[in-house]
Image (cartoon, helix red, strand yellow):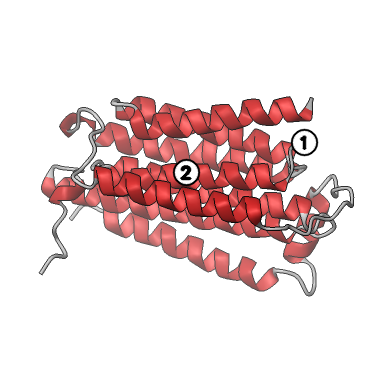
Amino acid sequence: MFDIVFWILALVTVGAALAVVVLRDVFRAALSLVLLFLTIAVIYITLYADFLAVVQVLIYVGAVSILIIVAIMLTRDVWHGNPSGKLRIPALVVSLLLLGTMVFTMINTKWETSGEPPMQPTTAAIGLSLFGGGGFILPVEITAVLLLAAVLGAILLIREK
Amino acid sequence: MSVGLEHYLVLSAVLFCIGLYGVLAKRNAVVILMCIEIMLNAVNIALVAFSRYVVPMFLTGQIFAIFVIVVAAAEAAVGIAIIIAIYRSRQSVDVDKFDLMKW
């Protein structure tokens, strides 16, 4: 049962990612990107990462895709289609080479997997290790500064002169 | 063969390479940004899969994935701001025409 779910998810995910690259209409490519984000949220659920699945839906499906669609609509009048540039063939070769290398390495490596059952639910444990003592509190603080810088930078870049 | 760590890693590699192809080959700057998001999501799948199968009693991989998501959101905001700023001055989102920093 679990295997069938995984294979369906993998097919839909790879199909949606290919559609982002292949589709001629940029807006349809953005919609298939939304489908990709949603299926990745379901993949997180199959990996027992319930909190991450919710975060994925909130941030990617909710916020990032809206940003991208707004950007497409703002720049749409100059752009019809989603063509490839001069580097199409070299890019294809480089991607396939990297894919072959990575798949070869991943299949031939003896991963030391642990047989323990996964922790669930994860929300309380993630909160404890993010904000608790000896955890990731310093990266969280740095993330706050990063977000402030990103917001200020976006406003500054997009301001009317 | 039941689904294990390798399956998730190969799925992540496939997604990463699709995103890499898009970043290298596409001419529309917004599509390039979308492909960067695909690559970041592929890396997140690998991190969460390692967290699930290698150290299921710790959540380090999931916490790394949360930080990747935060940085990706900041990157998307700044990237789209840059694209729209260039679009205002050049009336184009074609990366072949973005030669502002060429000397």
Query: Looking at the image, which is closer to me, B53 or A45?
Result: B53
Chain bearing mark 2: B
Residue visible at 89% across and 52% down in the picture: A116
- Crowd class of label 1 (few under 14; some 14 to 19; many from 20; radius 10 Å): few
Q: Is residue B21 left or right of residue A106?
A: left
Mark 2–mark 1 contact, CB under 8 Å?
no
Residue type at tag 1: Ser
Give percent across and percent down for residue B1: 76, 36
**Local secondary structure at mark 2:** helix
Q: Have a look at marks 2 and 1 and say if they share a chain.
A: yes
According to the picture, the residue beneath numbered tag 2 turns out to be B38
Location of the C terminus of chain B by quadrant is: bottom left
Residue visible at 44% across and 35% down in the picture: A66
Residue type at tag 2: Ile
Q: Earlier in the sequence, mark 2 or mark 1?
A: 1
Give percent across and percent down for residue A48: 77, 42
Picture quadrant where residue A22 is located: top left
Residue visible at 16% across and 49% down in the picture: B96
Q: Which mark is residue B98?
A: none
According to the picture, the residue beneath numbered tag 1 turns out to be B2
**Local secondary structure at mark 1:** loop
Query: Looking at the image, which is closer to me, B75 or B32?
Result: B32
Give percent across and percent down for residue B15: 50, 42
Chain bearing mark 1: B
Viewer-nearest of labels 2 and 1? 1
Residue visible at 77% across and 51% down in the picture: B53
Q: Is residue B56 above or below residue A149?
A: above
Q: Is residue B100 visible?
A: yes
